[in-house]
Amino acid sequence: MLMTQFDRLGWDPFAEMRRLREDMNRLFDDVAEVSASRLSPPVNLWIGDNSVVVTAELPGLTPEDVDLTIREDTLTIRGERKPAAEAEQASWHRRERAYGTFSRTISLPYRVDPDHVQARFRNGVLEVEMQRPEADRPRRIAISSQ
Amino acid sequence: MAQEMTTAARRQLAQTGETTRPAAIYRPDIDIFETADHVVLVADMPGVAPQDVDVTLERRVLTIRGRVPEESHEGYRKVYAEYGQGDFERSFTLSEEIDREHIEATHKNGVLTLKMPKAETAKTHKIGVKAA
């Protein structure tokens, strides 16, 4: 009875509600994915004798977009990925690349000297080379035989 | 407008035939959007130098490939890895509405951008309505 009335009006509030619920679910799915895996840059860690190298995949970013901070034995990479300028009035077919701000803190195996850090950007891959402070380096102790 | 050939999750190995290089092949993340005159495809290919990008169009199949040089640091060993070492590859089937002679490709900071102009016939025409 009720439904027939809605049919006649050409509008079904239940269909509207179902659609809203689906939209909301989709919205949250996207949010979870972006914050968890897409935006946060993947890193690799390399260890040498007295230095450590961190490489991170940051395609599309320039040195100005990234902010590096070192504190004791942690390295923080912060940055922002801006959307394409033209994308405002465009219609989207696919959107897999994430946009927004990110921050990642990587704990290093030892304390590093903040004065001896080299950071390079090459084709969207950031490379940060850090040295162990002179005072912290392991020293070889000679053993004398009696 | 541009339909993909294969589908798989992110950072998954692309489903292609075997290559002669012993490296993994990854599927780059892409954006596709459409403006009034163009269809733009943007692909993330970190580590790929502009000269190592290969874009081919064979009949209607558009393939983008990017070769990543072997990442090695003299005197270092890798102790932790979140991203794998390998090349990028992904294919799409283009619709007829793209002017295939004038596709523009640029590669900057590890991001490939393909600007594909729409063919004249595919552009939206506004039809004026006259009052009778």
Image: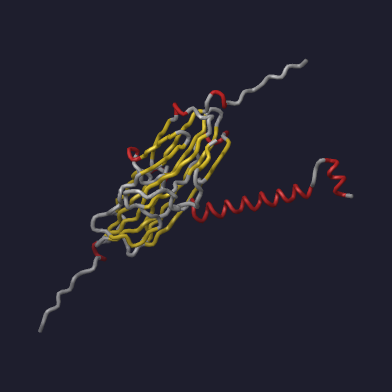
Q: Residue at x 64, y 53 (%)?
A: A25
Identify the residue at the far bottom of this view. A146
Q: Which scheme is used to colour this image of the protein?
A: secondary structure
Q: Which residue is depicted at the point 40% across and 36% down?
A: B56
Residue A76 placement (x, y as % from top left)? 41, 55
Q: Position of residue B131 (x, y in %)?
A: 76, 16
Question: Quadrant location of the C terminus of chain B?
Answer: top right
Give the residue at the far top of this rendering.
B132
In the displayed structure, would residue A54 be above or below residue A16? below
Residue located at (32% from left, 60% from top) = B78
Foreground of the two, B98 or B37: B98
| In the image: residue A17, left or right of residue B54 | right
Is residue A112 rendered to the left or right of residue B44?
left
At horizontal 44% and vertical 27% (from top left) the residue drawn is B102
Residue A136, picture quadrant: bottom left
| Residue B43 versus residue B59 in the image, above or below | below
Pick out the residue farthest to the right: A1
Q: x%, y% of residue B39?
A: 52, 33
| Whether residue A85 can be seen here | no
Quadrant housing residue A88: top right
Residue sitting nearer the eye, A26 or A124 = A26
Q: Dividing the image into 4 quarters, which one contains the N terminus of chain B?
A: top right
Q: Position of residue A90 (x, y in %)?
A: 56, 34
B66 shown above or below A90: below
Q: State how many labels appear.
A: 0
Residue B41 visible? The answer is yes
Q: Nearer the viewer, residue A100 or B62?
A: B62
